[in-house]
Image: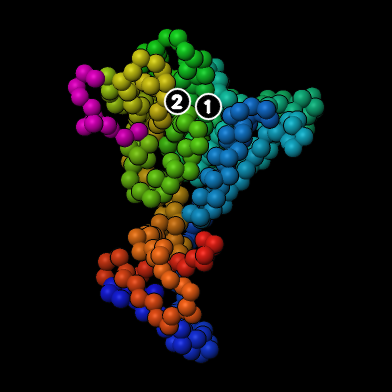
Amino acid sequence: MKKAGIIMIAVAVVLTLLSAGPIDYGSPARAAVTPRALLVLAFSPGENLRDMSVSDINSAVQLLWDYGFEVTLLDAWGQSGLVAEYPHHQLHEHLDDQSFNLVIYYGHGSSSDWAFCLPQDSAWASQSQTAQGWDEYREFGDYRAHWREEIKLASDALVVMRHTCYSHGLEAGDMNSGARLLVEEEVLLRINQYSYTFLYPYCGARSYTAIANVGATSSYLKNLFTNYDRSIGELTVPDYSDSHQPGDGYRLLTGAHPYLSGQGTVYRKNRFPGTSNLAVWSQPAWAGDPTLSMQRVCGCVPGDKNGDGDNVDLGEPCFPHDERDVFASEDTSYNFFPFLCLANPNPADTWAEITFYDEGGNT
């Protein structure tokens, strides 16, 4: 319904328009690119992290669909609670087409191999003469060399590590009560080592994010999608200097990546005040191209359904919703009144979307 001023809906007029047949509004522009996301779940059944990750994945998948992504999910475990059939080979098959713009990994980490940690299908690993067995035997994806020499993602891809030890600077034991407070050199070493695996030029990734917080994926991605033309690094690890006093313990740690400085790659990590690793170091870590935006990652504006270069139009995921005019006390005991007048809260010459709810709260 359009637009500035007063919107009037007359039942008779609506019925007349409907009876007149469809109106030709022309052929709208369409988004030319469909970004692709791969989500990998490696936590085993019975782990609390798996239960939390499943909920996180469900909301993330719905959000990705809303923003026009094609989503692929690889669960390294079967419904029986046993290891899925050749998960390492499945990963290889998924990555073979080199087209994923976004990879999100939910699983354990390694301070020696700095990559994924998928469970091994031992039955197939013993058949290394087959393609499936060879990938299981060598645990494809679990070593840095695979990402440096064999795996290619889409150009400017984003890799996100979820709950992965060492990837954001901490491992599980660092969060225990009484654990020593890590020095920044140790935290940055872990971040730079892990990010080096995925940011190595052959792989194609240009942005690396590691997040420890439970259930944070959807809110994180939505922030990137909403601010699609801004630096992913600055959105992931903001500079909070203005909110802190000099000497209170806060510092934004940023600089050239020690292993990739020639590629223009930098790292970012906030150090917050506190006496425990949870307080000081548990926030996200990031490394990559400081100019990279989500629009470049996707090759388009995420959620731009009509191809006009934004995602805020009617029917697109960032269309502004306004819930200020709610008539909770409206008397509806009489028959439906013929006119409903609502003011469009948006600027002139813009569209407003009106959602009607019944007494049960259904649309």
The image quarter containing residue 342 is bottom left
Q: Secondary structure at mark 1?
A: loop
- Seen at 70% across and 33% down, the residue is 77
Magenta region: which residues? 237-248
Position of residue 117 relative to residue 305, above or below, is above
Residue that lies at the very extreme toward the left in this rendered image: 246
75 above or below 121? below
Which labelled disc corresponds to residue 43?
A: none
Answer above or below: position of 23 versus 68.
below
Which of the 4 image quarters holds residue 88? top right
Please give the label number shown on residue 164: 1
Q: Secondary structure at mark 2?
A: loop
Q: Amino acid at mark 1?
A: Thr
Where is residue 306 shown, x and y percent of the image?
44, 65
Image quarter (top left, top right, bottom left or bottom right) of the N terminus: bottom left
Is residue 238 within the magenta segment?
yes
Could one spot residue 132 in this view of the protein? no
User: Is 287 left, or right, of 254 in this rendering?
Assistant: right
10 or 96: nearer the eye?
10
The local crowd at label 2, few if under 14, some if 14 to 19, many if 20 or more residues have their Cα within 10 Å, is many
Label annotation for residue 168: 2
Q: Residue 24 in the image: x percent, y percent? A: 47, 82
> Quick check: 225 above or below 105?
below
Could you tell me residue 124's position as x and y percent?
78, 29
Is 311 magenta? The answer is no
**Dot 1 and dot 2 residues touching (CB under 8 Å):** yes
Q: Residues within 10 Å of mark 1 (few under 14, many from 20)?
A: many
